[in-house]
Structures are given as structure tokens and as C-alpha cells.
Amino acid sequence: MTAPLHGTSTDSDPVATADVAADVVKASVEGRSLRQIAWSRLKRDKLALAGGIVVVFLVLVAIFAPLIVSLLGHPPNEFHQEEIDPLFGTPKGSLGGISSDFLFGVEPSNGRDVFSRVIYGARISLLVAFLAAVVAVVLGTIFGIIAGYFGGWVDSLISRVMDMLLAFPQLLFIISLVSVLPNDLLGLTGSGVRIAILVSVIGFFGWPYVGRIVRGQTLSLREKEYIEAARSLGAGRRYILFRELLPNLVAPITVYTTLMIPTNILTEAALSFLGAGVKPPTASWGQMLSKAVGTYEDDPMFMIIPGLAIFVTVLAFNLFGDGVRDALDPKGTR
């Protein structure tokens, strides 16, 4: 008989057992990146997760609006006079005409499907909010990082421009701009022109907020040891700006972007309410609220439904943005 082989099991060797345990701990520590740590924090925030789920749901609704409307509603600009009381001009039935055929009821006077118009209104609000945020983030990041890194007269000039834009009456400027621009511009017509104006102006007047945050972070980061090391090794300014500084600015930029989008949604709704948004008959939440002002006493649901759509959307983005901020900020506490 052959002798049993000893030492093949780590149970009888305390040193080997300790080494294996140390390797497991080391692997578990090394295996978690900053992204994984942030995700683990975000998963613990139930409100943020709920907000994120609602945000994803709203984005999907906006993308697949034609399919949803074809299955559950009617064309958004189709009139249904048979659903309107000819004497009072209000929807037949209770709660604004809500029924199995019209899930959110119908508009007073013309009988358009409120459900379909709310779904299509989500497209306008989210499109303007996201594109305006992209414009603001791109401009704010570029000018903020330049101002913070170079300092001196460059910083003073960019900072004064930011102060001027922050003091500028944005709403009045957009209203006056919309009133003088033609219906056709650069190949765009009707609501396309209005959407382009909203995105451009909201994004242009929003970049100073991002620029201030990026500038402040850059002023702090440019004195760090790894920046000095890059300079001593002969790295150029472009390399330092876009390969050393910019990756470390992703977290604050991401946080501010998630908090900027709901502000843009409210701005678009306010402009549409004042008549400076998309042109009728294109559906918009703010436009629906503006029309509901004259009929809320007879049909309050026509004001409540688009108002709830704005409220839920903004609340979801704010909850998700707060969660992202807490997840990316290791020093932040609730």
C-alpha cells in the first residue's frame, strides 16, 4: 500500500489556510472598481432606484409613443366631437370623459385623446431637456476646464461671461426671439424651429452653471501630485486637460447633468405655457396646462393629468439625481 499523501489539504496547514484567505480577501478588494462601488451604494438607495426605474420607463414611453398610442389610444390630433357635450362643450361622462376607449379622457371643445397627447408630450419634454443638457454640459465643461486650468486673464474673462449670462433674463429672451423668427429656418419648419430654439437657448444659458462647478473642481485638481508629475514628464496641456483632468471631472458632471434635466423640463413646460414652446397642434404638457386654464372649473381632469405628468417626471429625475450624487460622492451622507 502506498502511504497517504500529506500536505495536499490546507485544513491541516494553518499557514496555507491563511494564505488562501488572504488571497480571497485581496481578490474581493481588487475586484471592485469605483463604478462597482458607486453601483453598490446606488442599489442601497431605494428611492433613487425607484426614480431611475420611472425615468427609464418614461424614456421608453417617449421612444415608443407611436406604438403605445396605436395600441391604447387614438391619433393625438384626431377630433372626437361625439365625445363632447354640444351644449356645454365639455366631455361627456364623469372625470373628463375617462373610459376604456379614452384612458385619460378627452379635451374639452374638440375631443382629442388626452392619453395620446400626454404620451406625445413626453417626447417633446424629454427631447428638449436631454438635448439642452448636452449643449450645456459640453459648453460648460470646455469653458470651465479652460478657466480653471489656465487661470489669469482667461479665467477672469470666462468668469465674467458666466456672470453676465446668469443674470440675463432667459425667459424674456426666448419669448422675444420666438416672436421674430420665421416659421422656416435652416431646413426646419413649424415645431422643429421652436424645438431647435428651445434646445439652443436653454442649453446656452445653462452652461454657466456647469462651468462654475467644473472650474472649481479644476482649480483643486490642477495642484494635485499626479498633475505635477505629468508636467514634469513633459506632458502637453491638451494631454493634461483631456487625459488627466477630464476623467476626474466625470462624477460631478454626471451628477449635475441628472439634476439639470428636470430643470429643463420645467423650463420647457413654462415656455409652452406662455406660448413660446412648440406650435399647435404638436402636443406639449405646458401647452395643455395653458389650454386647461380656461376650462379647469368644468373639467379639472384636463389640468390635473398633464400637471401630474410634469410632477412625476421631475420628481423621478430629482430622486435619481440625488441618489447618483450620494453614490459618486464618498464623503456624502444623507
Image: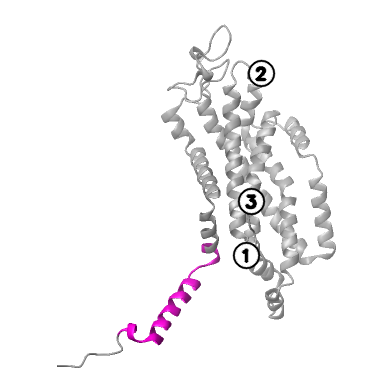
Residues at discs 1 and 3 in contact (Cβ within 8 Å)? no
> Where's residue 121, x and y in %?
57, 33
On the rendered structure, is 203 left or right of 116? right
Q: Which of marks 1 and 3 is nearer the N terminus?
A: 1
- Determine if residue 17 is in view: yes
Instruction: Please name the residue that numbered disc 3 is placed on.
Output: 257
Q: Which of marks 1 and 2 is nearer the N terminus?
A: 1
> Where's residue 88, x and y in %?
58, 9
| Quadrant of the drawing holding the C terminus | bottom right
Say which mark, if any, is on residue 294. 2
Q: How crowded is mark 3: few (under 14 residues within 10 Å), some or many (20 or more)?
A: some
The secondary element bearing badge 2 is classed as loop
Q: Earlier in the sequence, mark 3 or mark 2?
A: 3
Instruction: Please name the residue that numbered disc 1 is placed on.
Output: 247
Residue lying furthest top: 87
Mark 3–mark 2 distance (CA, rounded to whole Å): 36 Å
> Where's residue 201, x and y in %?
71, 42
> Where's residue 308, x and y in %?
58, 32
